[in-house]
Amino acid sequence: MGLVDALQYRLPAAGWVSILHRVSGLLLFVLLPFTIWLFDKSLTSEVSFEEFTSAFRAGLWIFPAWFVKLVVLAMIWAYLHHFIAGMRHLWMDMFHTVGKEQGRNSAIFTLVSSVLLTVVLGYRLFF
């Protein structure tokens, strides 16, 4: 199977959810040190909280503020998608609903809800 053949294959919504579930889990894992640093800075003291908020206003190290916000937005999407997709899997396991139509509908719900919630929280983050 060549690359051209692979690019022409149309993946169903459940396939996209499955792939993105893995991607979001990897992203959460890779960004875990940054998440812990943010959590520490936000709670340790008033001075460290000021460092935390300045990362979103003035940037962090060599990274401008817009880049920090973009990384946090990626973390927000990864968490929301991973959580909703995980709840989808738990739902299917609990109720043994693995039909094609139900799987398609729950996959679409997962994709749409994770993106919509990310947009809402991203708006709050950037404005």
Image (cartoon, rainbow, N blue to C red):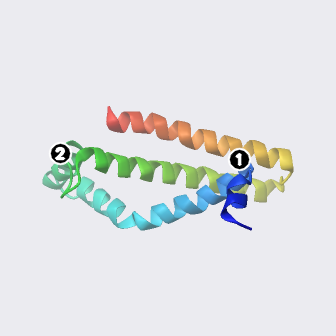
Q: Residue at x 63, y 59 (%)?
A: 19
Query: Under tag 1, what secondary structure?
Result: helix
Q: How many marks?
A: 2
- Which is more toward the observer, 90 or 119? 119
Amino acid type at mark 2: Ala
Q: Which residue is mark 2?
A: 58
Image quadrant assignment for residue 32: bottom left
Asked if residue 42 lies left or right of residue 12, the reply is left
- Which is more toward the observer, 112 or 43? 112
The answer to whether mark 2 and mark 1 are in CB contact below 8 A is: no
Q: Residue at x 46, y 34 (%)?
A: 120
Asked if residue 97 lies left or right of residue 127, the reply is right
Asked if residue 74 lies left or right of residue 46, the reply is right
Image quadrant assignment for residue 3: bottom right
Q: Earlier in the sequence, mark 2 or mark 1?
A: 2
> What quarter of the picture does the C terminus occupy?
top left
Q: Position of residue 68 (x, y in %)?
A: 30, 50
Q: Position of residue 70 (x, y in %)?
A: 36, 47
Q: Position of residue 22 (x, y in %)?
A: 59, 63
Q: Position of residue 112 (x, y in %)?
A: 62, 39
Q: Which residue is mark 1?
A: 107
Q: Residue at x 24, y 57 (%)?
A: 41
Residue count near mark 2 (Cα–Cα under 10 Å), binned few <14, some 14–19, many ≥20: some
Give above or below for 69 relative to 45: above
Q: Residue at x 43, y 38 (%)?
A: 121
- Which is more toward the observer, 84 or 1? 1
Asked if residue 66 lies left or right of residue 47, the reply is right
> What quarter of the picture does the N terminus occupy?
bottom right
Query: Under tag 2, what secondary structure?
Result: loop
